[in-house]
């Protein structure tokens, strides 16, 4: 009984599989591709959405970075013409003028102002931004000598309307060629040259700024120059042309100073006058004391030679003579002529020509002071 029942169930199952198996296969064949396609579509949408979410920030960052690079390297409103930069220079002090080194030491304050609409913001706050993060005229000191210290940080103040302010204080040496032909009664112009590196006069225009009735710049009333007097000063906006092919945008602060001659009168000229007058005393010493007369004239020449070595340290090695050089050489020649006159009179006395020796002494007592007086007059007035 049990075996028959099992056989009937097996037969029924076989019959069921034969009838419904093809239909089951057909259903699987139709449903599985649809399910797989839906799954793939869902995954694709997720991937596409992820890609969009990833690409959009990258594009925005790249655009922002490109905008920042452009704002740092491109002049504001470059297509409208030259960029205008307003300048204000204030010379706080001039502590030294070195004739031998052909330079002067100064303490200078600089303010620059320009407008960059790309930096404008409507939040009403003044921002401080590193100088290298914005466009700037890249100011260089064309005639700086050695290292010039900068006392202020390299930042700019950006106002809400896009106005940019830059402040800096420079302390150091500035080279200046000095024509010393009229030394020590000389007057010179001294220049602090500011140059915009990489910009020509057609791309950048410097204009003097106006602040509290000061236009372009000013200078302290008292500076640390005991032997110089400041006569005048001015600011100028002129291109920088070190060679014919360069026409860089630039501006300068120029001041004129005159040397105080009183120091050199007391320390240089007066000792020379004393030495020259000392050489004339030989003409009032008795002609019988020939050795004493020659010793006085000789010692005067040696003193002048030593004095000349001291004067050499005051000036550089020049290819021309200065006023003081002419005065020194003239004084030396007068002393040399006095020595020659003393030797001649001694020779005449030895050869018993006393009258001629006396005539030379009398002539020398008037001629040498007159000649030296003319030399001193030329040095002081001519």
Image (spheres, rainbow, N blue to C red):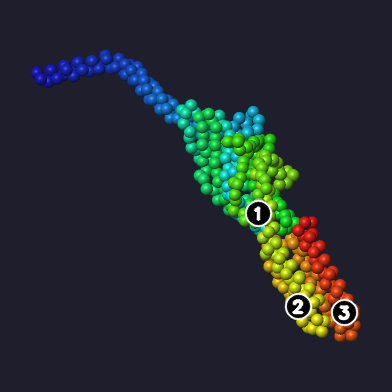
Which residue does the image show at 77% across and 56% down from the upper left? 381
Q: Nearer the viewer, mark 3 or mark 1?
A: 3
Against 345, residue 268 (above or below) is above
Which residue occupies the foreground of this view, 237 or 265? 265
Q: Is residue 303 above or below residue 115?
A: below
Left or right: 282 in relation to 38: right
The image shows residue 79, relative to residue 103, as above or below, that is above
Label 2 element class: helix
Q: Which mark is residue 357?
A: 3
Residue 215 shows up from this direction = yes
Dot in front, 2 or 1: 2
C-alpha separation, residue under disc 3 versus residue under disc 1:
49 Å
What residue does disc 1 label? 228
* Front tag of 2 and 3: 3
Q: In the picture, residue 215 is in which quadrant?
A: top right
The 10 Å Cα crowd at callout 2, few under 14, some 14 to 19, many 20 or more, is some
Q: Secondary structure at mark 3?
A: helix
Tell me what residue is drawn at x 44 percent, y 26 percent.
52
User: Foreground residue, 187 or 117?
Assistant: 187
Instruction: Name the residue at 19% across, 15% down.
Output: 12
Identify residue for label 2.
Answer: 296
- Which residue does the image show at 69% across and 43% down from the upper left? 240
Give left or right: position of 149 versus 299.
left
Q: Is residue 74 left or right of residue 187?
A: left
Nearer to the camera, 361 or 235: 361
Q: Residues within 10 Å of mark 3 (few under 14, many from 20)?
A: many
């Amino acid at each position: 009984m049990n075996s028959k029942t099992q056989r009937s169930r097996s037969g029924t199952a076989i019959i069921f599989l034969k009838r419904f198996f093809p239909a089951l296969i057909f259903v699987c064949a139709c449903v599985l591709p649809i399910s797989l396609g839906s799954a793939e579509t869902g995954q694709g949408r997720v991937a596409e959405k992820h890609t969009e979410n990833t690409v959009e920030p990258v594009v925005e960052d790249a655009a922002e970075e490109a905008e920042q690079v452009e704002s740092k390297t491109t002049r504001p409103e470059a297509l409208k013409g030259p960029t205008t930069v307003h300048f204000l220079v204030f010379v706080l002090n001039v502590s030294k003028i070195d004739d031998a080194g052909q330079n002067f030491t100064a303490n200078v304050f600089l303010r620059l102002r320009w407008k960059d609409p790309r930096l404008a913001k409507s939040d009403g706050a003044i921002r401080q931004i590193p100088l290298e993060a914005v466009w700037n005229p890249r100011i260089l000191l064309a005639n700086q000598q050695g290292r010039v210290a900068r006392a202020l940080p390299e930042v700019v103040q950006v106002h809400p309307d896009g106005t940019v302010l830059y402040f800096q204080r420079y302390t150091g040496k500035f080279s200046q060629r000095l024509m010393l032909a009229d030394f020590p009664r000389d007057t010179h112009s001294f220049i602090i040259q500011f140059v915009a590196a990489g910009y020509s006069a057609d791309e950048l225009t410097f204009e003097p700024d106006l602040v509290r009735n000061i236009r372009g710049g000013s200078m302290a009333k008292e500076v640390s120059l005991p032997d110089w007097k400041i006569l005048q000063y001015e600011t100028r906006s002129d291109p920088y042309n070190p060679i014919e092919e360069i026409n860089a945008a630039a501006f300068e602060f120029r001041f004129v100073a005159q040397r105080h001659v009183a120091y050199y009168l007391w320390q240089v000229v007066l000792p020379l006058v004393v030495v020259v007058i000392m050489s004339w005393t030989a003409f009032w010493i008795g002609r019988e004391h020939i050795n004493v007369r020659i010793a006085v004239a000789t010692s005067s020449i040696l003193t002048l030679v030593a004095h000349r070595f001291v004067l050499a340290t005051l000036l550089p090695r020049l290819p021309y003579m200065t006023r003081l050089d002419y005065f020194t050489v003239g004084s030396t020649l007068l002393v040399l002529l006095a020595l020659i006159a003393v030797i001649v009179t001694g020779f005449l006395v030895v050869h018993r020509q006393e009258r001629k020796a006396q005539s030379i002494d009398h002539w020398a007592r008037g001629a040498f002071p007159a000649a030296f007086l003319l030399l001193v007059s030329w040095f002081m007035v001519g």
